[in-house]
């Protein structure tokens, strides 16, 4: 019986997953604090409380996310790009292109049939096209970020945003609120603006089917549908677990591989 | 010797340059590798490649350049605006790219606004974008004009004999740099990219004779080393926009990789990278500095440039290539796209990154991409 864990310290949320006997046993998500080590410890503590498993029982733990280098208890660190690729293909085996939209970054990853990383691109500096864009817009709209997707489904005439800049778009949202545009149309406009920005990045790599979307924003139906429409292809949804956990799942899978490699050859030096 | 190079590569207060100045000798700054340094040595002047290190903000440069411009020339202007280049006796600016050409306008205007920020002598060297025909003659004429301006400003005479001597001595430095490059091409690598590149950068700011001595010692030291620094690490080639901070290479080498070669506007590119020591010296300088078309500023020479670079990358025998460009660098930004395509055709994995210049680079995000690239190279079906 092998128990392994993956811990993904992201810019906005910290996620952890335990895999037992090659199945996701349990998971946890918390808001990230300023210190990655503390966030990682907290999320693992939460997970241990939920499962009754102790730290000693974890045969191997892999860390990922921007704070991966600062987690003291992990056995190995792997970049979030590799982890999202690994996790996504395990959850959707036919996936060849992954779009991961996290709190403060967006990545497009191409994989081969074996799940090897072929190519990737990430956004630069600008926060539009990331979860933070939706966070800011939801705050201006005085609603939860999860409502953006739900409400936008009711829209028949989405507003058009002149700019995808997070700062300028805020001003646009306020203008539309004061013009008494229905909230659902503004939400749909926000989701479309977000999808437009992500599609620019996705188009820099030649998308190969199946396309899969991961990260917290994958839970926003409005963005996913708008993105599928702009890119002109079907997006496979992750159903086996919360798509926000994909990076942590990938990290746990890397932990599982490491564990298996050590089991097969205890003298092997694993990268 | 390592400390001498590190000191020269990481600070603007370089001890050997201070010593040079103490002896009442002149120092002239320049901005582009297309500016021949030999006439300055022939005139007894130290040519010093201008660098934007130590620029931790852009409040001065932003007001002259605006925000949507490559951060390298802006960093140069910022450093000049804060008075850190006050020790210069002159500056030669040239049209390495449009933004570097604009540095001429911006610096002159800043000189009116910030007293003391403009050096006593300011010269513009117009470098053509083609290497042949009329463009070659134009460049020869530009070098002659620059030499005449040096003679007038500094009250010196650049004799043909002095110029020949300067060419010969600079060739000696180039030969040493080529020796260093050859050591980096070996299967067993005895020098990290950070160490080698620090030494290469130092050569553009240290007085030539002092530098040549230290470089010769370093080469001998490397030859006597036994540890293979590339063992179990991926060998990478770094190419693209001007990069005079070895921090970028250091960051890459923290990710289980070794930078075994680079094409970043510094150092030598091949064994032909030498000035002819026979014939008219000015024509020989023009032939060396303008030929090769090593930089995307040279128009219509992509195929030749790509073939030469590809050949070099294969000789160095790397696992992958990192193509970087400073944000808003049109020349390398567009050329990296073409080169990425050609690398793919040659089954060489590459990573494209866009960054800010030097100290303004976002190291965290860059590290994540480099880590992922190394993982990509380690993941199985990558060719070498």
Image (cartoon, grey):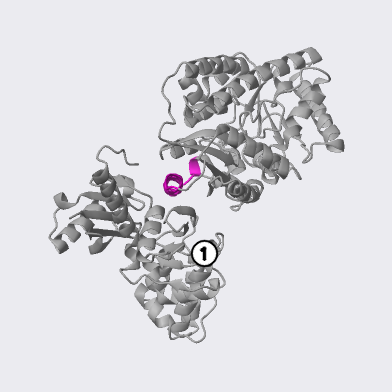
Which residue is the site of mark 1?
A208
- Relative to the observer, which residue lies in front, A137 or B212? B212
Q: Residue A195: where, in percent of width, then height?
A: 49, 70
Q: Circle 1 marks a residue in which chain?
A: A
Give left or right: position of A30 versus B322.
Answer: left
Q: Residue B332: where, in percent of width, then height?
A: 63, 46
Give the residue displayed 86% in from the left and 32% down from the top.
Answer: B137
Give left or right: position of B145 versus A256.
Answer: right
- Residue B148 in view: no
- Relative to the observer, which residue lies in front, B236 or B314? B314
Give the residue displayed 40% in from the left and 53% down from the top.
Answer: A82
- Residue B46 in view: yes
**Please, is residue A187 above or below residue B85 in the view?**
below
**Where is the N terminus of chain A found, in terms of image quarters?**
bottom left
Helix, strand or loop for the magenta stretch, by majority: helix
**Please, is residue B128 above or below residue B163 in the view?**
below
Q: Residue B135: where, in percent of width, then height?
A: 83, 37
Q: Which residues are magenta?
A: B359-380
Q: Secondary structure at mark 1?
A: loop
Q: Circle 1: is it few (<14), some (14-19), or many (20+) Cα within 10 Å?
A: some
Quadrant hosting residue B43: top right
Residue A250 part of the magenta segment: no
């Amino acid at each position: 019986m092998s128990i392994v864990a993956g811990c993904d310290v992201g810019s906005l949320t910290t996620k952890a997953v335990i895999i037992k006997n090659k199945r996701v046993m349990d998971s946890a998500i918390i808001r990230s604090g300023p210190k990655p080590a503390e966030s990682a410890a907290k999320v693992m503590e939460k997970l241990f409380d939920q499962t009754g498993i102790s730290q000693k029982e974890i045969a191997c733990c892999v860390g990922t996310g921007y704070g991966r280098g600062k987690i003291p208890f992990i056995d190995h660190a792997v970049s979030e790009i590799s982890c999202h690729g690994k996790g996504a293909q395990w959850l959707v085996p036919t996936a060849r292109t992954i779009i991961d939209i996290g709190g403060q970054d967006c990545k497009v990853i191409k994989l081969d049939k074996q799940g090897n990383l072929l190519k990737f691109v990430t956004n630069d500096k600008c926060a539009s096209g990331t979860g933070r864009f939706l966070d800011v817009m939801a705050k201006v709209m005085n609603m939860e970020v999860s409502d953006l997707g739900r409400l936008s489904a009711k829209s028949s005439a989405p507003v058009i945003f002149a700019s995808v800049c997070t700062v300028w778009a805020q001003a646009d949202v306020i203008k539309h609120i004061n013009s008494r545009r229905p909230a659902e149309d503004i939400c749909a406009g926000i989701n479309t603006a977000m999808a437009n920005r992500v599609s620019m990045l996705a188009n820099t790599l030649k998308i190969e089917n199946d396309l899969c979307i991961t990260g917290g924003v994958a839970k926003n139906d409005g963005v996913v549908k708008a993105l599928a429409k702009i890119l002109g292809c079907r997006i496979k949804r992750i159903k086996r677990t919360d798509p926000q956990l994909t990076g942590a799942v990938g990290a746990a899978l890397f932990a599982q591989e490491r564990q298996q490699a050590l089991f097969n050859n205890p003298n092997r030096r694993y990268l | 010797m390592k400390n001498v190079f590190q000191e020269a590569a990481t600070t603007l207060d370089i001890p050997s340059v201070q010593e040079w100045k103490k002896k009442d000798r002149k120092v002239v700054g320049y901005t582009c590798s297309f500016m021949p340094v030999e006439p300055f040595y022939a005139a007894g002047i130290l040519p010093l490649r201008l660098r934007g290190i130590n620029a931790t903000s852009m409040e001065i440069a932003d007001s002259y350049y605006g925000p949507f411009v490559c951060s390298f020339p802006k960093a140069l202007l910022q450093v000049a605006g804060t008075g850190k280049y006050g020790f210069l006796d002159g500056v030669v600016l040239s049209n390495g790219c449009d933004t570097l050409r604009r540095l001429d306008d911006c610096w002159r205007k800043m000189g009116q606004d910030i007293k003391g920020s403009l050096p006593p002598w300011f010269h513009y060297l117009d470098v053509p974008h083609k290497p042949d025909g009329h463009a070659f003659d134009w460049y020869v004429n530009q070098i002659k004009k620059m030499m005449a301006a040096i003679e007038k400003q500094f009250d010196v005479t650049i004799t043909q004999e002095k110029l020949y001597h300067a060419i010969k001595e600079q060739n000696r430095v180039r030969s040493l740099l080529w020796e260093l490059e050859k050591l980096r091409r070996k299967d067993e690598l005895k020098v990290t990219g950070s160490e080698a590149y620090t030494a290469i950068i130092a050569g553009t700011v240290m007085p030539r004779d002092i530098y040549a001595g230290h470089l010769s010692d370093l080469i001998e030291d490397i030859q006597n080393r036994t540890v293979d620094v590339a063992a179990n690490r991926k060998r990478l080639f770094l190419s693209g926009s001007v990069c005079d901070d070895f921090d970028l290479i250091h960051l890459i080498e923290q990710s289980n990789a070794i930078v075994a070669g680079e094409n970043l506007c510094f150092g030598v590119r091949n064994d032909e990278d030498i000035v002819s020591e026979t014939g008219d010296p000015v024509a020989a300088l023009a032939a060396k500095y303008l030929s090769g078309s090593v930089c995307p500023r040279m128009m219509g020479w992509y195929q030749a440039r790509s073939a030469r670079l590809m050949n070099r990358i294969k000789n160095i025998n790397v696992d992958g290539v990192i193509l970087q460009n400073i944000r808003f660098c049109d020349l390398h930004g567009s050329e990296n796209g073409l080169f990425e395509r050609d690398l793919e055709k040659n089954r060489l994995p590459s990573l494209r990154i866009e960054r800010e210049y030097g100290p303004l680079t976002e190291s965290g995000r860059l590290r994540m991409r480099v880590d992922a690239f190394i993982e990509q190279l380690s993941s199985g079906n990558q060719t070498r």
